[in-house]
Each structure stands twice: as C-alpha cells, then as structure tokens.
Image (cartoon, grey):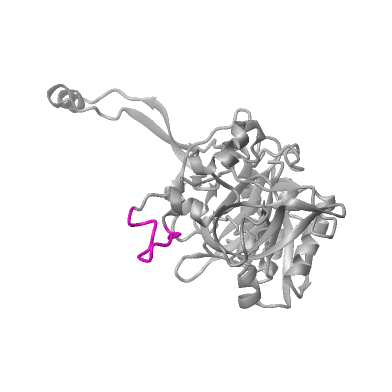
Amino acid sequence: MEQQIVQIVTIKNKTPLFKGEEQANAIEKIELEENGFSLVAQKDLYKIGDKAVYIQPDYCLSDIPLFESFIRPGGDPKKSKLGSNNRIRAVKFNLHTGDNEPVYSVGILLPYHEVYDLLPYDGFSYNKEGSLEETNLVELLGITKWEEPEPTIPGGKQSGGRNFPENVYKTDETNINNLWNHLENKIGYPCVLIGSVKVDGSSISIFCDEVSDEYAVGSRNLIKPEKINKTVGYRQPTLWERLKKFFTGYMPDLRIRELVENDDKFIQLAKPYIEAIRSKSASLGMPMSKFILRGEAYGAGWKGSGNKNNPHSKLEPGILFFGVDGYDQNNVAYKLDDDWFRSYMDFLGFESTPVVFDKIFYSREEIEKECKEYFKNNMVEGIVLRTPDSKFSAKFMNDEYDSKK
C-alpha cells in the first residue's frame, strides 16, 4: 500500500484547543479528509474545505525558503521543532481538545497558495487547469526519506551485499493514519487485530533455504550471504600475463580468493539463530523448506532511531521476530498468517515481539484508545497492527516517543 509523501489535502474539520478551561486564541487543531494525522495550525489560517499541502512525518525537509520558518523559526535554528537532518517528527502541545489529553501535531501542513506561488511553472508541477500535481512535488520540494542509521557494533564490520530481489518485499510498515479508510472499507468493522510492540532497532531478515542449506541475512536494504569470497593472498603472474602486461598494459587479477564465513555484523548476530534452524531441521531428519524470518535486531550497538528513551537499546544484542514469509508458486515472498508464525517461533524456540493485545475492535476510536492507553505506561516506538491472516498490517506510532527522537 503505497503512501503519498506529499499530498494535496482538504481541510475536514477544525477544533478549538484549551489550556485548562481557557480556550487558546492563536492555534487550533486541524483534521484532514485524506488521512488521519493530527495537526495544529495558526487559528483561522485555513477554512473547512480549503486545499493545503501535507508532508508526511519521518521525511526530511530541504533547506529552501518555503521551510525557513520550520528550520530556523525567527532566524534561530535552536528553536526548530524538527529532528536531526530536518526530519519531521511529532510536536507536543500542552493543550487539549476538552479531554485533558495533550495534542500532537504530526507532519507539515502548508497553505496551498504558498506552495503554488513558490514553485516555477515547469510543465510538470501543475496540471492543465493550472493546479498543483502531487506526482512531482517530492522532487521539487527536495523532500527526502529519513533512514535509521546502520548500527555500529564495536569491532563490527559491514560487507555490503546485494539489493533485495524483486520477489521479496521490504518490511517498512505504512502508518495507520494513511490506512484508516482502507481498514474501514476493505477490512471492515468489527475486525480482529493483533497488536505487537514496534521495537526500535534495525530491521533484519534471515533467508533460509533448507533444501540447499543456503542462508543469507538482510538488513533494511541489502542481503548479505553467509559465506563470501575473501582475498587471502596474492599469486605470481604467469609468463603469458607478464608478456600481455608488457605489450598491452593488461593488469591481471592476482588475488587468491577463498570461500570464508562472512564477518558482517548482521551475519554474526544471526549466526546462532541460523545454527538453531539447522539443528532443528536435522532433528526432523528433513529440511524445513524455504522461508524468511522477519525481525528486529536490538540491544547495545543496535540503537535504531537513537532515541535515548529506547527501552531495548541497552540490552544484550538479540533478535525479536515479528513475522515469517513463505513463497508462492511464482517464487514471490508473502506473509504467512499468525498461527504459522507462532508455530515457527515455538518450534525454533525464538522470541517474538511482545503482543500487546489480540482482540475484536468495533471502531477506529477503540483502536486509538487501546494503543494510547498502552503508551501511557510503556515508552515504546509504537505498535504494529495486524489481522490474523497477516494480509493487513500497519504501524500505530507513539507520538510522545517520536517527539523525543
């Protein structure tokens, strides 16, 4: 389910904000037609039905005049509410809508005309009626994706790797605020949702092919093999190679390579898990076929977003798993349902991400309440919501946690 990084949105509703019992006179809460993100804006800057430009959280703003007030409010970068690299994060306001719960502004909202006036007409950013097009706004505004930094373990190494193949999806979850309509109209209420802790670490995938006894480990973007060809020495050139070099300038490859264990840190972390899979397969006397275990690497050196409140960052390194994939008849990876996942975890003896709830919900409001109640006593990055068949999944982010990144 592809999300739009920059959207042309419609103002759906405006709600007064209060400090105690006194109404705020400068700002108000904004709701949008197109997504469920909560926003705070200058009072009367927008009217219901107005068009505006919305930029998703977790993306980084470019340093252009349009974003000056966000990057350097009043000319002072220290007053910026953005995270590192101008990353858009949740901003907390000690105001409420009447329920005494603090309000967060998540994302960037801009008046339509401000963006329209800034961008030059180039034949791409506007349609034939002269209205802004969404398709080119990401590039024109210089919006980039914030990526969790690759973790560094003392003495750990990275060996690079190859890109994920097209038949294997990446584990990035879509924010639930982009999927409320999908949940209501495609899944429907009442629905059963399983909520598990979104661990703030580094995405890790273990690729298992028990038939060929081949394993590999994926980081967020790369797949790293269990064994690699490593240069262990150099040989002397042959007579032919010396002659060819003399007459043509040809430079022979004199490296001696040997297939050795990959010392990449992802491989090293996954090694005991791979050995456990091998052992279990051997105990059955038959291979467990081909599958992918999906998880989150956590603990010392795997700090994730770098949030100092991360409850997993100081633990001994390990992996908490949240899913398992099989392959269909076209060799395309797909998520197995929750029962299969639990069976794999029980059989292998691996730990999974803690389950917060597994219950029936009758509305969006019930889901929001359940997640927010958990966040009050648990400073975690968020909760991943899944249907039991794993065909729907989304992340419900903890705004308080995000505001501290």
Task: Where is residue 86? Give x, y as percent.
Answer: 57, 39
Which is the main secondary structure of the residues drawn in magenta? loop
Note whether residue 220 is visible.
yes
Q: The C terminus lies in which quarter of the figure? A: top right
**Residue at x 38%, y 63% (from the top left corner):** 127
Task: Where is residue 389? Give x, y as percent.
Answer: 65, 72
User: Between residues 166 and 341, which one lies in front from this camera angle?
Assistant: 166
Task: Where is residue 319? Give x, y as percent.
Answer: 68, 47
User: Between residues 219 and 243, which one lies in front from this camera angle?
Assistant: 219
Q: Is residue 131 magenta?
A: yes
Q: How many marks?
A: 0
Q: Is residue 279 magenta?
A: no
Q: Magenta span covers which residues?
A: 122-135
**Residue at x 61%, y 56% (from the top left corner):** 293
Please determine whether, in this image, residue 9 is positioned above or below residue 150: below
Note whether residue 198 is visible.
no
**Residue at x 85%, y 56% (from the top left corner):** 100
Please determine whether, in this image, residue 242 is positioned above or below residue 161: above
Determine the residue located farthest toward the right in the rendered image.
21
User: Between residues 209 and 39, which one lies in front from this camera angle?
Assistant: 39
Please determine whether, in this image, residue 158 is positioned above or below residue 178: above
